Amino acid sequence: MLRNLISNLALIIEACKREFKLIFSDSAVVMSYMLSVMLVGFFYSYVYSHETFDDLPIAIVDNDQAKLGQQVGRMIDATHQLKVVYKTSDFDAAKEIYDKGDIRGIITIPKDFTKDMQKGKVPSISVYADASYMLYYKQTIGAVMVSMGTFNAQVEVNKAMANSTPMDQAVATRRPFNVTAVPLYNINVGYATFLMPVVFIIALQTLQLTAMGIMGGTLRESGRFAQVFAYAEKRRFGNVFLTFGRSLAYLVISMVLLLIEVLIVLHVYNLPQRGKLIEIIVFLIPVILAITFLGMGLVNFFKRREDAIMSVTVFSIPALMISGTSWPTIAFPAWIENISVLAPSTLGVKGFVSLTQFGASLSEINDVFIKMWGLCIFYFIFAVWTNRRFRREENK
Amino acid sequence: MAKKGFLSIFKEECYRIFSSPRLLVLMIGVPVMLFYFYFSLLSQGVSRDLPVTLLDLDKSKLSRQLGRMIDATSSMDIAYEVSDELEGQKTIRRGDSFALIIIPKDFQKNIQKSVYTNVLCYYNGQYLLPAGLIQRDFQMAAGSFAAGAKIMNLQQSGLMADQAVATVVPTGTNSHVLYNPYTSYGYYLNVAFMPMSFQIIIMVISIYAFGSVLKYNRGKELLEQSDDRIFVAIIARILPYTLVFCLLGLLMNSLLYYKIGVPFRGNFFVVNLFFCSFVVVSQSMAFFMASIMSSMRTALTIGGSYSALAFSFAGYTFPPEGMSAFTRGLNYIFPFHSYMRFTVDYAIRGIQYNSIQQNYIITMAVFVCLGALCIPLYYKKLKKGGYNVEKLD
């Protein structure tokens, strides 16, 4: 009984050691696994490190040419999101510049804007925003809405004061209650903060699966699969321990990679990290193991060395999409919601973002954690079966 | 003796494609599947009824009315009602709910007494898309609730309805959403995601087409078959792939502009023509990779990563205005950047041909030249037979 236990333990350690050797002896694997994950982490963070952009150029078509219309123009120009680079009273002239791509939006102030306001009519300004790129649109509309809100408030308070209400009171009684919207976690709506935690998991998954696919494909192409793993002699549950031992090597490497991302990349680029490190590590264990077991299972589909390189990468953006960060899960069609669970990254991203960005504790997301282990076990069985299959097949 | 000439290589290659299930799946199956995936994923276009949490500390007639107004917005759905703030925060931290809306105690009483009171919405800024929608709709719903109450107040103190409205809302704003009238993400993202995924496939398959001759040391045979005419060898070899990709491009564009109905302001023929030239450009880059690398595996790894990185440098979801000058320059080394910007300018915005678009065309021409420059290199490798024949000799 004890002897059994010791020899099983020995097999696990042996498998882990040999897997390390196998990984480091193939430069393509080292490159596409370790180097690329680091590169993606640093490089993407760099690309998005500005987080937001300021002073999007727009034009104002002022048909009013009077005091209040000009005030509106100045207020819009004063926002950090927009910059008025062109002022005219000719809409066609503005449109021409717009078509050249020099400006991203046009704001028109109607004729008699000031006069109408003084008469007590409600004139409207018009915003033409470029929605062919969503961020241009959001930036333009957002800044104009804020400016106009402030402008309206000023006018309203001025009117009240003209009716001999003291200013304090005019401000206080402008609305029966105040409305405040406060962003949490990603307070500047930054793009790097939004994307990077997700990219870490997706990149690790994509690149680790590719690397494991290259290795598995190479072994199968050269018919050495059984031979390489022949050290695990026939015994009860031999393949179980072999699979487990092999996965430990990846667990160590991937954990180190992800910790570099969490501790160094996030720090270098000033991105937030609000979780407890130990809880993050504990959560990442089933995430990495699930990816690893999936990687072993996928060898079924990779007959040749190049197969994995050709087919895994293309699924990185779909994996990103089904993680529910860019497009909310609630808008998924049912079939995609169902298959999304099969990608380890889906639950992995959900938990990882909760821990590192929202500062949740592991106990708060324990259902995600438990499901992650479930997926892990599911792929473990797949991996054991695969290892068994190829060792037997080639032995024949 | 085997047949020679352009047609024989072309036919042989067609036969190879259509008799290899692996190639067929990767080349046709995967793109079509991904087109369908994106189409289905984004079919809602605009996300509605995002789950939010309501903490109503007042539980009065007015606070319930406000809650109903928030629930009635298109973007929000009150999925959780909690009784204390900690519980509410938990729903946010777990990522189940996108916002926590707090109606304070004595909300109704304070309003009636004209005491300052504040309705708060903490929304999760991490999810950019829901955050934008919730912030907008919350301001709108709660803001108009407050404005409505004020208008009623003013009317009670003797103002006419028009006057009261003009006092509270002195000016209006008309938004004109150009090119994407419903701000549909289905239109917006499909236009980019479909060609993005497809160009990865184009890249790796083309590298495979050029590289596998060299990997399996069949270079000499190919040259022989083409009577030592390198152009014939290259073009006959790649043409079947080019044709299949162009046809798939036609399928993709039909799906985008007819089935999904992305507002389209260009000419359908020109858009397809442009896609075909993009296929040629990508294949030139693939040819470049296959020629200069020392093995097919390296060419595939580098080519695959290169095309996978392209999306971030397309400046589509995150515009070039937010990138450093260096990154903005870097954008141009990805043909996909030029393809995407040009397609949006031409097909979506329908604006006239201008100097920026000319840059995109020039950039794409440069890639073709880059491929052409590698022809002698590839010829040499073919003559040698394969990537690593020296070792075998």
Image (cartoon, coloured by chain):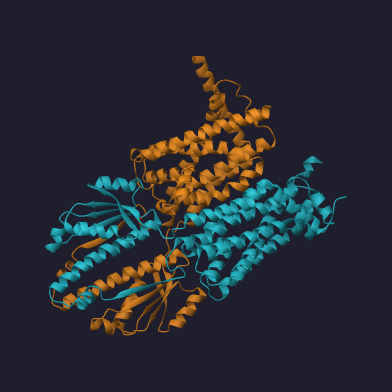
* One can see residue A277 in this view: no
Outermost residue toward the right?
Answer: B1
Of B211 and B388, the residue lying toward us: B211
Q: Quadrant of the C terminus of chain B?
A: top right
- Is A395 situated left or right of B383 in this image? left
Quadrant in which residue A396 is drawn: top right
A27 lies above or below B30: above
Of A175 and B177, the residue lying toward us: B177
- Is B178 situated left or right of B53 in this image? right
Q: Position of residue B75 (x, y in %)?
A: 35, 59
A274 lies above or below B118: above
* One can see residue A116 in this view: yes
Chain B painted colour: cyan
B369 lies above or below B98: below
B81 lies above or below A92: above
Q: Position of residue B323 (x, y in %)?
A: 48, 61
Q: Position of residue B307 (x, y in %)?
A: 59, 55
The residue positioned 27% from the left and 83% from the top of the image is A116
Colour orange belongs to chain: A
The residue positioned 47% from the left and 79% from the top of the image is A95
The residue positioned 46% from the left and 82% from the top of the image is A93
Q: How many marks?
A: 0
Q: Position of residue A322 (x, y in %)?
A: 47, 49
